[in-house]
Image (spheres, rainbow, N blue to C red):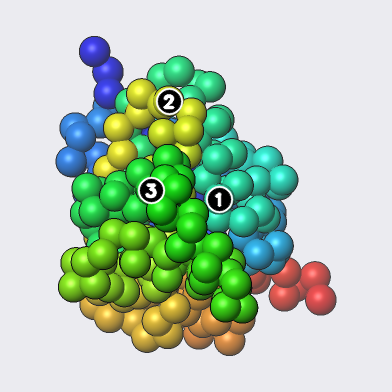
């Protein structure tokens, strides 16, 4: 029976880190096919994608994705919680996806799942701690982080997990899987070489944030180093066509 891997992505743009994640995910589950649920022209926080959705789709297809489905804008620009819920809802509705792979700084689904279980079940003790932290004037995200750490009561084990953006999103995916009673099996791949907001290129790996900054300075040499050739060629042509239109 064929195994289908699902990934959730912005691919803004598709870079070497994405290729690493995709390759490692396929190997981990021996996937026959891969479906990418991808943000279109608008991404999280309401930003406009550096490359248009057609270019991003072409990059994905030429680097090993078999099917690209556009994530509706209402989900793509939403909070992490609603972003995760929308994505899981769509992947479930396909009724073909066996695995969901996401990147995280921790890369331990079991530990991430301990946070997700609390957020899903909302035990009374946790809610009491959360309300107490909110009463101190903390923002909701900070109050939730404090409440989770106090409820789980193991600072050495859980410290810094909620300070990493991909860990937070991974926990929301796991929570959404529980909420929707999904049969999809989660898988986490550790980010390689660079973190979410790193600005340097290390051994051909750069964050999407760094790549977008490089692209805006027309630094073709460094852009080429951080992207698969197929992705670079597509992006280069798009950026060149924009310049010619100015």
Residue 128 spot, x, y in % from top left: 48, 58
SS assignment at label 3: helix
x 20%, y 34%: residue: 29
* Circle 2 residues within 10 Å: few <14, some 14–19, many ≥20: few
As drawn, 238 above or below 243: above
Q: Is residue 84 left or right of residue 158?
A: right
Mark 3 or 2, closer to the camera: 3
Residue furthest right as drawn = 246
Q: Residues within 10 Å of mark 3 (few under 14, many from 20)?
A: some
| Marks 3/1: CA–CA distance | 14 Å
Q: Position of residue 82 (x, y in %)?
A: 60, 47
How many numbered marks have been drawn onto this rendered protein structure? 3
Q: Which residue is mark 2?
A: 181
Residue depicted at 72% across the width and 75% down the height: 243
Name the residue: 27% across, 23% down. 3
Per the model, the C-alpha gap separating discs 3 and 2 is: 16 Å
In the rendered image, which quarter is residue 131 located in?
Answer: bottom right
Please name the residue that numbered disc 3 is placed on.
118
Q: Gap between marks 1 and 2, in whole Å?
A: 16 Å
The picture places residue 68, in percent across and down from the top left corner, at: 52, 37
Q: Tag 1, which secondary structure?
A: helix
Position of residue 62 measured from the top left corner of the image (x, y, whole percent): 42, 45
Q: Which residue is mark 1?
A: 81
């Amino acid at each position: 029976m064929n195994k289908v891997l699902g990934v959730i992505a912005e691919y803004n743009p598709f870079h070497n880190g994405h290729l690493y994640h995709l390759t490692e995910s396929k190997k981990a589950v021996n996937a026959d096919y891969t479906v990418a649920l991808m943000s279109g022209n608008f991404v999280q926080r309401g930003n406009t994608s550096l490359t248009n959705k057609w270019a991003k789709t072409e990059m994905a297809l030429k680097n090993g994705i078999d099917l690209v489905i556009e994530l509706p804008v209402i989900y793509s620009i939403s909070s992490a919680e609603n972003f995760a819920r929308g994505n899981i809802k769509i992947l479930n509705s396909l009724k073909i996806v066996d695995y969901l792979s996401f990147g995280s700084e921790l890369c331990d689904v079991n530990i991430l799942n301990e946070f997700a279980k609390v957020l899903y079940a909302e035990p009374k003790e946790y809610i009491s701690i959360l309300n107490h932290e909110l009463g101190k004037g903390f923002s909701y995200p900070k109050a939730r982080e404090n409440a989770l750490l106090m409820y789980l009561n193991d600072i050495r084990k859980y410290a810094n997990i909620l300070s990493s953006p991909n860990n937070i999103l991974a926990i929301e995916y796991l929570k959404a899987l529980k909420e929707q009673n999904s049969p999809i099996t989660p898988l986490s791949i550790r980010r390689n070489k660079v973190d979410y907001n790193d600005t340097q290129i290390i051994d051909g790996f750069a964050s999407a944030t760094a790549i977008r900054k490089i692209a805006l300075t027309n630094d073709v040499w460094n852009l080429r180093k951080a992207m698969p050739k197929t992705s670079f060629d597509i992006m280069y042509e798009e950026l060149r066509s924009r310049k010619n239109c100015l």
